[in-house]
Image (cartoon, rainbow, N blue to C red):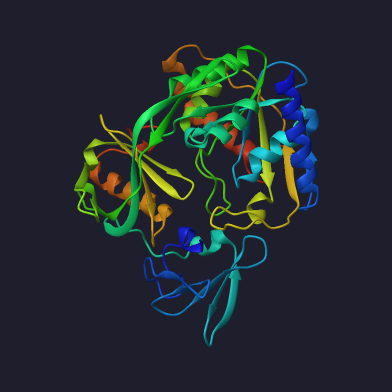
Amino acid sequence: MIRDLLWGCVVCGTMESLREVDRIETCEQCGARYRRAHGAQIAVEVDGRGIETRSAAEWSGQLPPVTPTGTAECLARVAESDMQVTGYGEYLGRVERFGNFKFGQVELTEQALIFRARDGEGSFEWPLSELTAVQPSSTSLQIKAKRRPVVSFKFVDSSSRLWEERIQLALRQHYSTREIIEFQPRISLR
Amino acid sequence: MIRRARYHFYRWLARSLWSVMGGVEVRGLENVPKTGAFIMIANHQSFLDPILVQAVCPRVLHSMAKSTQFGSPFFRRLLTQLYSFPVRRFEVDPQAVRQVLRRLAQGNGVIIYIEGERSWDGQLQAPRIGTVRIALKAGVPIVPVRVDGAYDAWPRWHRKIRRNRIRIEFREAFRLPHLESREEREQHVPQAADRIMSALRPGGRRG
């Protein structure tokens, strides 16, 4: 989805406003329509202003600034166990086995990332100080906290790219006196 | 023997399929060492990169692939047949590092996508420092490979693949200092990362 790349409308600047209407991603706020054009270019059509086609990188440069807090509906699943991978008689490594997805809402505050399951299966909280990695994986986002299993989030109407940048920004503000030099495989500070 | 035959069958299949999807233009094959261990470091624009780089490279490439890809029995079997091994990217994975060093010690070529993820916007992303550390520890030749056109064929944010000509350029191999001590390696990480990334940029050294 284009909204995975462009988490805000590049025309009106509204965050997380792109929704699919008749198979065309459209800004709920201003009505701008987004389509894939030639190659990986993106055409943005605004009524009365015509169509403008630019590269994904150029449109990305027009995005509204990321905020370090927010909420979104998502599917979350936790790695429940590990599995050994072997091949041709050789031990290759371990792979996480995820449980079922739980639908709910994720919230990022200045102190923590919180997931509240919709079906009343409780809530989970990861204080920012305990996060050890933030890792995108295809259209999901994985987070890891100290002594806790890895969790994978799939966003329903939002963008994993936005949430990666959002959590990174929140962590930078949390460790404001030190520089974060990497977010994966572990958060390293200088 | 059967494994190698399967690998070459998949290479042929990938090349054949992409020949009707726009074709692949390959440059710099002379930069791929004919014998001995090397680390190939590539940019990552699309799911197509690992398939097509391995399809056109004359040497068998052992690849580091994200652990979630080994989740299904089908892909686990396919990837291990293709000399892949898993890496957990959300924590330090010593077994993945051991796998790289073991395969290099056996005289093989290992390919690593230094950005760790497909680019969202087609631009080269920051390097994963772990790859640079491995390169400094291994002390084998580094072969940069630049892929262009794969993003236009299948960007990360779109489900559909489109026909497009893909250019794969194997660039001039170089060596980083082989550093045994961890302290020395850490000191060299920034300049080694710069050296690798400058070789991967559009219009970088071609050899």
Answer whether residue B137 is visible to the viewer in this image. Answer: no
Identify the image quadrant of the N terminus of chain B: top right
Q: Residue at x 39, y 65 (%)?
A: A64
Query: As drawn, which residue projects farthest toward the bottom?
Result: A48
Q: Residue at x 20, y 53 (%)?
A: A120
Instruction: Give left or right: position of A121 versus A96.
Output: left
Give the percent coordinates (x, y) of residue B107. 67, 14
Front-most of A150 and A130?
A: A150
Answer whether residue B103 is visible to the viewer in this image. Answer: yes
Instruction: Give left or right: position of B159 versus A117.
Output: right
Q: Splitting the image into 4 quarters, where does residue B204 fall?
A: top right
Front-most of B128 and A86?
A: A86
Q: Is residue A117 above or below residue A21?
A: above
Q: Splitting the image into 4 quarters, where does residue B38 fall?
A: top right
Instruction: Give left or right: position of B107 versus A76.
Output: right
Q: Is residue A152 above or below residue A75?
A: above
Give the percent coordinates (x, y) of residue B182. 43, 16
Q: Residue at x 41, y 66 (%)?
A: A8
Give the percent coordinates (x, y) of residue B65. 54, 33
Q: Is residue A180 above or below residue A157?
A: above
Give the percent coordinates (x, y) of residue A126. 23, 42
Front-most of A65 and B177?
A: A65
Identify the image quadrant of the C terminus of chain B: top right
Q: Residue at x 73, y 23 (%)?
A: B4
Instruction: Give left or right: position of A109 versus B119.
Output: left
Marks counted in the figure total: 0
